[in-house]
Amino acid sequence: GEEVAQTPKHLVRGEGQKAKLYCAPIKGHSYVFWYQQVLKNEFKFLISFQNENVFDETGMPKERFSAKCLPNSPCSLEIQATKLEDSAVYFCASSQSRVRSTEAFFGQGTRLTVV
Amino acid sequence: GEDVEQSLFLSVREGDSSVINCTYTDSSSTYLYWYKQEPGAGLQLLTYIFSNMDMKQDQRLTVLLNKKDKHLSLRIADTQTGDSAIYFCAESPTNTGTASKLTFGTGTRLQVTL
């Protein structure tokens, strides 16, 4: 597709439940990034992929968070046993290659509310 | 570590120019970006500048980079009500190009009044 598609737009989970978010990058883009936007607009980098391989996971919490990008499937970000502080908007972005221009295209985000 | 700072709020009258400022600490920053976020929406890339440039102009947008002071600014000429949004500056380090993560500033909310 021509845009980064994130689903669902909104997700409500009770504390302790699992949350799974999906991202379909732009066709032909090799890199996928996940960011978390919390209160006060702060963006936190979580993880990036080069195709199906983890490229940089320095922002991923050690527990409860996992992510995958499998061939022919949307990428996913999964949070096990959600906590109130996981409430945020999760953005996915994709970019084309290391060599070409540096633009990363962002999806519309998934708003996760943990109650 | 990297740190990117912005003022939180700016109010301008329609038709005036807006200047949004950003400071960063990472001296290895190679790419510096300006993104716009409208309410409930994702991030829209407005423009970017390489660290070997001082200025970049794109229609109503002018980006100025003072690498010595690590200061980046975005000037919007003839500001319109549709420019009301939150503006984020972001930087990424050298060497890793488009694969590198972005470090975002805290965002500046621009309010355009009639």
Image (spheres, coloured by chain):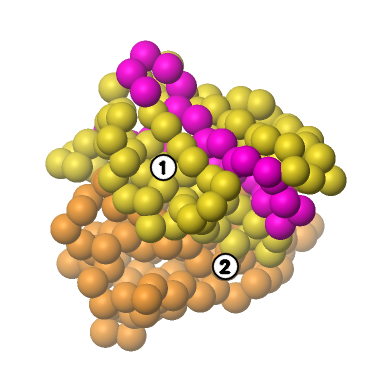
Q: Which chain is orange?
A: B
Give residue B18's quadrant in the image. bottom right
Q: From this viewpoint, is residue B60 visible?
A: no
Looking at the rendered structure, the kind of residue marked 1 is Phe
Q: Is residue B110 left or right of residue A70?
A: right
Where does residue A9 sit, x and y in percent of width and height?
A: 68, 30
User: Which of the labelled discs sits on residue A33, or is there none?
Assistant: 1
Foreground: disc 1 or disc 2: 1
Which residue matches tag 2?
Answer: B106
Q: Quadrant of the C terminus of chain B?
A: bottom right
Give residue A14's quadrant in the image. top right
Q: Quadrant of the N terminus of chain B?
A: bottom left
Q: Which residues are magenta?
A: A70-96
Where does residue B31 sit, x and y in percent of width and height?
A: 28, 59
Shown colour of chain A: yellow
**Residue A90 among those drawn in magenta:** yes
